[in-house]
Image (cartoon, helix red, strand yellow):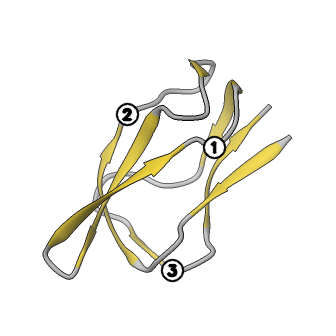
Amino acid sequence: MAEVKSEIAGKIVAVNISVDDTIEDDDEIFLLEVMKMELTVRGGVDGTVKEILVAVGDTVEEGQTLAVIE
C-alpha cells in the first residue's frame, strides 16, 4: 500500500480520481493551487485507488496524505 502525499502546502482545486480507479505512476491525480500557481500531483505508483482523503476546496499541509493506493 502506498500513500500519495502533498509535497507542499496548498489548496486542492481538482481531484482527477475516484475510489477503485486504476492509476499509473505518472497519472495526474490532484491539482493544487500554491501561491496563485497550479501544481500537479502525480500518483507515483501503479495501483488501485483505495481511499481519497481530500476534496476540492480543502487546504492541505506539506506531507499530508491525499490518497491511498494499493
Q: Where is residue 39, by image quadrant?
A: bottom left
The mark found on residue 16 in the picture is 2
Percent of width and height locating residue 26: 52, 34
Q: Relative to residue 43, is residue 60 drawn left or right?
A: left
Residue occupied by mark 1: 44
Q: Distance of mark 3 from mark 1, alpha carbons?
A: 19 Å
Q: Residues within 10 Å of mark 1 (few under 14, many from 20)?
A: some
Q: Amino acid at mark 1?
A: Gly
Locate the C terminus and report the quarter of the image it occupies: top right
Q: Which mark sits nearer the N-terminus, 1 or 2?
A: 2
Q: What mark, if any, has residue 2 been given in the picture?
A: none
Foreground: disc 3 or disc 1: 1
Kindly report the distance in space between the C-alpha atoms of the residues bearing marks 1 and 2.
14 Å
Which x, y percent locates residue 20? 63, 19
For image coordinates 40% across by 47% down, the residue present is 30
Give the numbered dot on residue 61: 3
Q: Check the picture and name the quadrant holding the N terminus.
A: top right
Q: Amino acid at mark 2?
A: Asn
Which label's residue is closer to the chain start, 3 or 2? 2
